Image (cartoon, rainbow, N blue to C red):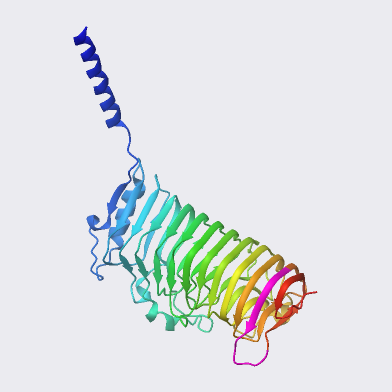
Amino acid sequence: MACISYSFKTLCLFLLFVAAASRPTNKPKVFNVRRYGSKPDGKTDNANAFTSVWKSACGRKSGSSKIYVPKGTFYLGGVEFLGPCKNPIEFIIDGTLLAPANPMDIKQDIWINFRYINDLSISGSGILDGQGEQSWPLNDCHKNPNCPKLAMNMGFAFVNNSNIKDITSLNSKIGHLNFYSVHHFNITGVTITAPGDSPNTDGIKMGFCSNIQISKTNIGTGDDCIAILSGTTNLNISNVKCGPGHGISVGSLGKNKDEKDVKDLTVRDVIFNGTSDGIRIKTWESSASKILVSNFVYENIQMIDVGNPINIDQKYCPYPPCEHEQKGESHVQIQNLKLKNIFGTSKNKMAVKLQCSKSFPCKNVELIDVNLKHNGVEGGSSTAVCENINGSASGNMVPQHCLN
C-alpha cells in the first residue's frame, strides 16, 4: 500500500509539472531592431530593417510583440507600419530616430506612419529628430503653388485603442504628430519642440477623431500647440504647457464642403506661456459648409504674456485678400461654450475677442471668473470686444465683459 501511495503522489506531481510547463506565458516576444540588421551610426538608412521587424512582430499569431529600439542614432528614411496586426504591439524607442535633412529624401507625407492598427503602444525615452531646419525656408505654399511637400514627423491613421507616452518629437519639417480617424487614444508625457519661428510646425493635429486624451505634455512650436480640426469629438486636454506657439486652436473650420461637427472638448489646467494665442476658435467667413461647434469647456487656464488670450475669430483670413467679401458671413455655428477661471496677462490690450458670425451668432457663451490684465507696451487696462454673441458673465471680470 505504501508503494502504491508513493507512486500515486509521484504521478500527480508529474502531471502538475506538465500542466505548468504547457501553460501559455503572458510575456511578449521582443524584437530588437539591431538583430534585424539596423545600424545606429546615424548614416545607414534603416527603413528596410525597421519594416522587416514590424512585419515579424505584427504577424506573430500568439501573444503580444515588443519592438525595441535601443540607444543610438538610427537614420531612417520614410517608413510606414501597416496593420492590421494579429496581436497587440508595444513599440519602445530609447534611441534617436533621425530623419533625412533633405526633405526630398522622404517620399511620403509623413516620415513615420502607423495605419490600420489596434492596440498599439509607443513609449520610451527616445527622440524623433525631424531635422527640419533645411525645410523651413521652403514652407511658402501660401504664395508659391510649386512649394515642395514636407513630411510630418509621425502620423496615425485608422488607429484605435492605442497610446503614445514619454517620446520627444524634435524639429519637425512641418507638423509633429498627426491623427486622422483615430479613436480611443491616449497621449501622455510627450515633449514636442521646435523654434517659435519654424513655420507650420503644429504640435498635435487631429481630424475626424474621437475619445482622445492629452495630458502631462509640453509643446513649444512655430504654430498651433494643438490643432483641432473637422469631425473631432470627445477630446480631453489637461495639464499641458504650451509655448511658444499659436495656442490650442479649433479650426480653421468651414473652408471645405465635407467638414463635420466639432463637439465635446474639455481643456483644463493648461498654461500658455508667450504664445500668440491661448484659447482660439477660427472659422472662415466664406464658409463652404454648415457645421456645429458645441459643448466646449475651458477651465483653470493660465496666460503668461499671451498675445490674444481668448480669441473667437469667425472672420479668419490668414492671407488677404479673402473671398468673404463676396460670399458673406461664416456658416459655422458656435454654441454652449464655457470659460471658467481664465487668468494671467495679455500682451495686447484687447485680451478678450469674441467676434462671431452675423448669420450664425454664438449662443450660450458663459464667462466665469476671467482675470486677464494688460501687460504690453500700450498703456491702459485690458479690453474686450463682442460681436454677434449671446451669453452671460459672472464672478470676477477683467476686462469688463461685453456680453448681452
Visible in this render: residue 73? yes
Q: Main secondary structure of the magenta part?
A: strand
Determine whether 248 is above or below 347 in the image.
above
Residue 378 drawn in magenta: yes
Image coordinates of residue 56 in percent, x first then y, are 31, 49
* Residue at position x 28%, y 25% in the image: 16
Please give the range of residues in magenta.
366-380
* Residue at position x 43%, y 84% in the image: 137
Visible in this render: residue 151? no
Quarter the N terminus occupies: top left
Relative placement, left or right, of 275 versus 299 is: left
Q: Relative to the observer, which residue lies in front, 164 or 135?
A: 164
Image coordinates of residue 54 in percent, x first then y, are 33, 54
User: Which quadrant holds residue 32?
Assistant: bottom left
Relative placement, left or right, of 172 versus 354 is: left
Residue 230 drawn in magenta: no
Quarter the C terminus occupies: bottom right
